[in-house]
Amino acid sequence: MTKNELKKFKEILEARQAELELFVRNREGIAIEKSPDALDEVQHAAERELAIRNLDRESNLLRNVRGALRRIEEGTFGVCLHCEEDISPKRLAAVPWTPFCIQCQEIADRNQAEGTESFDDLMVHAA
């Protein structure tokens, strides 16, 4: 990968990191609100659950973006953490924070769906 390509990916990842950090800092949606009306109480609980799930998803994405930036600094960006093969340029263009090539990502997704090995377990074994 050329220095210009790495610079482009770094800029994209830094912009995404800044965007995600703003989102993750906003925790107003998870505040517990009390209401005298039971239906309002249920509505608030559902909205809070959705906000928590979004926060969790965005936090995981932020962790992946930070990992990709760290791999750029270490010189391992674009190399699958599991099989150590190059990640395709098309995949990096679509998901620049990906730690895995498409084949290893499919294995991780399948294992996670089956409950045999979590995505985090695969990351630990790859490191």
Image: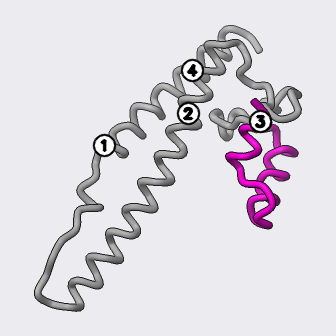
Left or right: residue 43 versus residue 114 is: left
Q: Residue 62: percent from the left, percent from the top?
A: 50, 39
Q: Earlier in the sequence, mark 2 or mark 4?
A: 4
Disc on res. 90: 3
CA–CA distance in space, label 3 to label 2: 17 Å
- The residue wearing badge 1 is 25
Q: Which residue is mark 4?
A: 10
Could you say which is closer to the camera, residue 78 or residue 53? 53
The reply to whether the magenta stretch includes residue 15 is no
Which residue appears farthest toward the bottom when viewing the image? 38
Circles 2 and 1 in contact, beta carbons < 8 Å:
no
Q: For the residues labelled 1 and 3, say whether their Cβ atoms are less than 8 Å apart.
A: no
User: Residue drawn 29% across and 84% down?
Assistant: 42
Q: Place residue 30 in its image quadrant.
A: bottom left
For discs 4 and 3, the disc positioned in front in the rendered view: 4
Q: Earlier in the sequence, mark 3 or mark 2?
A: 2
Q: CA distance from mark 4 to mark 3?
A: 16 Å
Mark 1 and mark 4 in contact? Answer it, CB < 8 Å.
Answer: no
Q: Which residues are magenta?
A: 101-127
Please tell me whether residue 8 is drawn above or below residue 109 in the rendered image. Answer: above
Residue at 79%, 25% in the rendered image: 79
* Mark in front: 2 vs 4: 2
Which numbered circle lies on residue 100?
none
Name the residue carrying label 2: 65
Q: Where's the C terminus, which quadrant?
A: top right
Q: Magenta segment, principal secondary structure?
A: helix
Neighbours of disc 3 within 10 Å: few (<14), some (14-19), many (20+): few
- Type of amino acid at the residue the image marks with label 2: Val
